[in-house]
Amino acid sequence: MAAVLTGLGFYQLLNLLKPLRLKQSVAGGILLVLVLGHLLYADKWQLYDSYRSSYFGTTTALAKNLQDTKTIGVIAAGIHPTFADGLYYLTNRDIIYFNPTTVSELTNNGELKKAFAIYEVKTAVGFSKTISADIERLTGAKTIAWDKNN
């Protein structure tokens, strides 16, 4: 629908430019260059906003840390499902997302070790320092703490 409205708008604009005795191809070319220039400029800022508000920097740093330490087994991620997807892409390792609230509840119920054993989790990343300490103490899994506030 937007493409149809845009096309009609361009058609009307070309009709307005006809009385100026410009060739339609020249006017169309100028318009095309202006529209493409605007789209490229707007796309640049959209990509900048996406990168600035993403976990990509954190994801690449943790992926490098995991590759350097040569950890094995499933990784439990606790930052955000998008982070878990990026970590999977960069490490090519099995990743499972655990919400930090769920980990706290499992800790309080004494079932964290059982849950980690079911999924064969050997490493946990993306949890706060306190949750990471609980994970290490209760399961023996290696943890890499990450918390924006710490």
Image: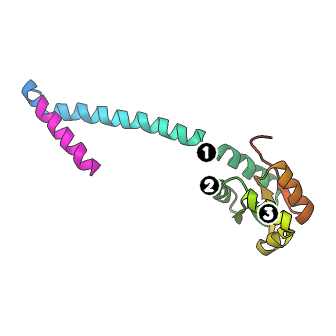
Judging from the image, what secondary structure is the residue with disc 2 in? helix
Tell me if residue 89 comes above or below residue 51 in the rendering.
Answer: below
Q: Residue at x 75, y 57 (%)?
A: 100
**Number of the label disc, if any, that sits on residue 7:** none
**Spatial distance from mark 3 to mark 1, Cα to Cα?**
27 Å
Q: Residue at x 25, y 43 (%)?
A: 6
From the image, tell me which residue sits under label 2. 82
Residue of label 3 = 105
Give the magenta-colored segment's residue range. Answer: 1-17
Image coords of residue 72 (percent x, y): 81, 64
Q: N-terminal of the two: label 2 or label 3? A: 2
- Given the image, on which type of amino acid does mark 1 rest? Ser
Whether 15 is among the magenta residues is: yes
Amino acid marked by disc 3:
Glu
Coordinates of residue 41 in the picture (x, y in percent): 42, 33
Here the colouring is rainbow
**For the residues marked 2 and 1, what is the alpha-carbon distance in whole angstroms?**
9 Å
Whole-angstrom CA distance, mark 2 to mark 3, is 22 Å
SS for callout 1: loop
